[in-house]
Image (spheres, helix red, strand yellow):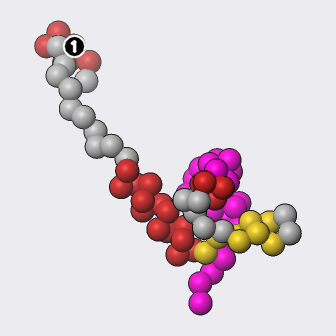
């Protein structure tokens, strides 16, 4: 049986703004259930959404630094 999390619990767990969590829910990226005014998402769905977000993050690009500026790194 999966644990259900509120938007506030998701926000705190993932350290992000409440609006971002709600945006993911409304766009269909994060499945949820609404009971009254409170939205709930299953913990396993939250973890899957977080993994998909992390996979989409672009890798850091190494750029050339001018030799005169290397001392500032």
Which residue of the protein is positioned furthest toward the bottom in this rendering? 1
Q: Quadrant of the C terminus?
A: top left
> Where on the picture, by quarter, is residue 1?
bottom right
Q: In percent of the image, x 36 and y 55: which residue is there?
A: 55
Per the image, the residue denoted by label 1 is 69
Where 61 falls versus 27 (above or below)? above
Main SS of the magenta segment?
A: helix
Which residue is at the front of the view, 35 or 7?
35
In the structure shown, which secondary structural element does the residue marked by tag 1 occupy? helix
Horizontal relation, residue 65 to residue 24: left or right: left
Q: In percent of the image, x 17 and y 9: which residue is there?
A: 68
Taking the magenta stretch, the answer to whether it contains residue 61 is no
Q: In percent of the image, x 61 and y 75: which residue is there?
A: 42
Q: Local crowd at mark 1 within 10 Å, few (<14), some, or many (≥20)?
A: few
Which residue is at the front of the view, 35 or 63?
35
| Residue 59 visible here | yes
Magenta stretch bounds: 1-23
Where 48 falls versus 3 (above or below)? above
> Where on the picture, by quarter, is residue 69?
top left
Q: Position of residue 53 (x, y in %)?
A: 44, 54
Q: What number of labels is visible?
A: 1
Which residue of the protein is positioned furthest toward the top in this rendering? 68
Taking the magenta stretch, the answer to whether it contains residue 5 is yes
Q: Position of residue 22 (x, y in %)?
A: 67, 54
| Residue 12 visible here | no
Q: In percent of the image, x 60 and y 54: which residue is there?
A: 27
Horizontal relation, residue 40 to residue 62: left or right: right
Which residue of the protein is positioned furthest toward the right in this rendering? 36
Which residue is at the front of the view, 35 or 46?
35
């Amino acid at each position: 049986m999966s644990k259900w999390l509120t938007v506030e619990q998701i926000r705190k767990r993932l350290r992000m703004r409440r609006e971002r969590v709600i945006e993911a829910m409304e766009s269909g990226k994060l499945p949820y259930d609404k009971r009254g005014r409170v939205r709930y998402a299953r913990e396993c769905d939250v973890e899957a959404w977080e993994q998909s977000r992390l996979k989409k993050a672009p890798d850091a690009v190494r750029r050339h630094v001018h030799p005169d500026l290397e001392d500032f790194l």
